[in-house]
Image: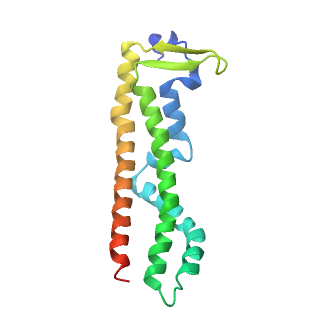
Amino acid sequence: MKDTSIAVCPVPDEQQPLNEYEQLKESWFFSCCTGSLKGYLKALAWVWGLSWLVSGPMAAASYTPKKYLGHFLLSGSAGACFLVVLVLVRLYLGWSYVRGRLVNSTVFYEESGWYDGQCWKKTPEILLRDRLVVTHQVEPILGRLKRSFAVLGGLVVAGVVSWNFC
């Protein structure tokens, strides 16, 4: 059933905030945030593990694993966490952009190029629908990402504290 208020929307389909949300949700990179916690943590663990391919040899060059195993593991883990942080920042920026587009009462869009931008004021029904999507779909994702940043920050602090005990 098609909503008649959506039919009068002049915004091109690919620039409508709800469609941008759907595209983001279905993309392979951003979809890891929408699934289960186990799948999300598994994706982050893969990124962290693959980052060891770069950070491990760099840490081994600085701290010989046979002599300084603790320092090697901590510095390699910190280096691997750097790529995880970059991935989390990209995920957060993408989801917060879509959140902003959904929450705003006006939609900026381009009809054919950068030079002819227009603004369209959302109808109350569309604004309510978009804000419900934000409340029940996007905010939990952003909350998960914020908690991930907090956990990584805690791990970094724990690593710094334990550095002196290695």
Q: Is residue 159 above or below residue 60?
A: above
User: Residue, x 36% and y 26% (percent of image)?
Assistant: 131
Q: Is residue 114 above or below residue 31?
A: above
Judge by depth and name the residue closer to the eye, 66 or 24: 66
In this figure, what is the number of numbered marks? 0
Q: Position of residue 111 (x, y in %)?
A: 62, 16
Q: Position of residue 153 (x, y in %)?
A: 36, 60
Q: Is residue 115 left or right of residue 83?
A: right
The residue at the far right in this view is 112
Q: In which quadrant of the rendered view does residue 113 lie?
A: top right
Q: Is residue 64 left or right of residue 99?
A: right
User: Residue, x 51% and y 12% (percent of image)?
Assistant: 7
User: Residue, x 49% and y 13% (percent of image)?
Assistant: 120
Q: Position of residue 135 (x, y in %)?
A: 33, 33
Q: Is residue 12 above or below residue 52?
A: above
Q: Position of residue 124 (x, y in %)?
A: 36, 14
Q: In which quadrant of the rendered view does residue 166 lie?
A: bottom left
Judge by depth and name the residue closer to the eye, 28 or 152: 152
Q: How is the image coloured?
A: rainbow
User: Residue, x 35% and y 38% (percent of image)?
Assistant: 139
Query: Does the rendering let one see residue 43?
Result: no
Query: Does the rendering let one see residue 115?
Result: yes
